[in-house]
Image (spheres, grey):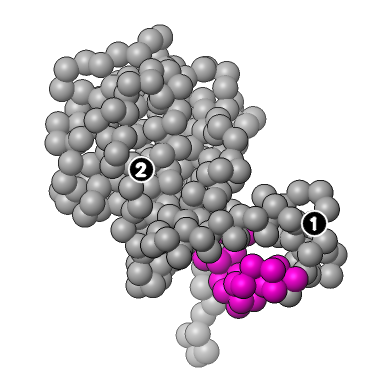
Amino acid sequence: MSDGGADLTIRDVSARTGVGQPTLRMWESRYGFPVPTRRPSGHRRYSERDVELIRQVSRDREAGLALPAAIERAVSSEAPAEDSIFAGLRGRRPDLQPHVLPKRTLIALSHAIEDECCARAERPVLFASFQRERFYRDAEARWRELARTAELAIVFADFTEVRRPRGAPVEVPIEATGVFAREWSLVCDAPDYAACLSAWEHPGQDKVADGDRLFETIWSVEPEIVRTAARIAGGLAEGMADDLLEPVADRLAQSAPPSGEQMRIVGALTNRMVAYIGAAAVMPLPAPHSSAGG
């Protein structure tokens, strides 16, 4: 977000925008906005464009927009068209911490999100990227069941064309050699349940066993982050057929329900737990030291 000429201190920005320094630090920590440059000393430096965007957020807040929605609007005005859900989330939410997980852990995490979506979500909006059509065909029966109660379900893979099979997700093709072809993503956005994960496959794994392939992964259950992921996925789908999002366009344009502090704590704990499980799957943890006298 910051660009050349980023030489304003946080004190300068606070004085020019009326937003306190502690508030600016909290926004950066919690929402990844603004994104200052860092001097070797670690001191923040901001640009004139940062000042404009912070003022925009303040104006939108005064007009009644929730803080996450105001920040999302400001960030969206800066963001170029995304090439993938993973890249889009990382660009908009640099506060999300990626973890490296093997494919077998991703499968378990995806199934958990899907099962909970099927059990709890009412009329969800669903997106998923499968890399290859054959991977989707292996899961097609499962996704037909998910699509049955969804407001809209869209799947991405190296299909040959856009297809809208009856009683099944819309199939949207991706370029086999593009950035999106290295991605595994799942988004479930519903009023009563929100979850997403997005993973990017590390290159150079042609000789690695399928279940051991490694993915750099981010995930969240915070509604604002999930709504951001849904909007990015929707934009990618519209690039192939501009009428795909008509049934849910108004819904995705609305602000997501706010994430309470308890939700963020639960999300952080879940992330840490899954990260440990994934790390153990990649490299087993050493045996614990014996206790004294053991």
The disc label shown at residue 253, or none: 2
- Which residue is rendered at x = 75% and y = 71% of the image? 12
Q: CA distance from mark 2 to mark 1?
A: 32 Å
The number of discs equals: 2
Q: Is 167 situated left or right of 216 in this image?
A: left
Q: Secondary structure at mark 2?
A: helix
Residue matched to label 1: 6
Residue 176 on image: x %, y % = 52, 17
Residue 155 on image: x %, y % = 34, 27
Most frequent secondary structure within the magenta stretch? helix
Q: Earlier in the sequence, mark 2 or mark 1?
A: 1
Residue 130 vs 116, above or below: the answer is above
Residue 256 on image: x %, y % = 34, 53
Q: Is residue 26 magenta?
A: yes
Please state which of residues 243 and 240 is positioned toward the viewer in this rendering.
243
- Which residue is rendered at x = 38% and y = 40% of the image? 230
Residue 211 on image: x %, y % = 45, 36
Local crowd at mark 1 within 10 Å, few (<14), some, or many (≥20)?
some
Residue 163 vs 70, above or below: the answer is above
Give the residue type that dot 1 points to. Answer: Ala
Q: Is residue 180 visible?
A: yes
Give the residue type that dot 2 points to. Answer: Ala
Local crowd at mark 2 within 10 Å, few (<14), some, or many (≥20)?
few
Question: Bounds of the magenta span?
Answer: 12-34
- Which residue is rendered at x = 38% and y = 49% of the image? 226
Q: Secondary structure at mark 1?
A: loop
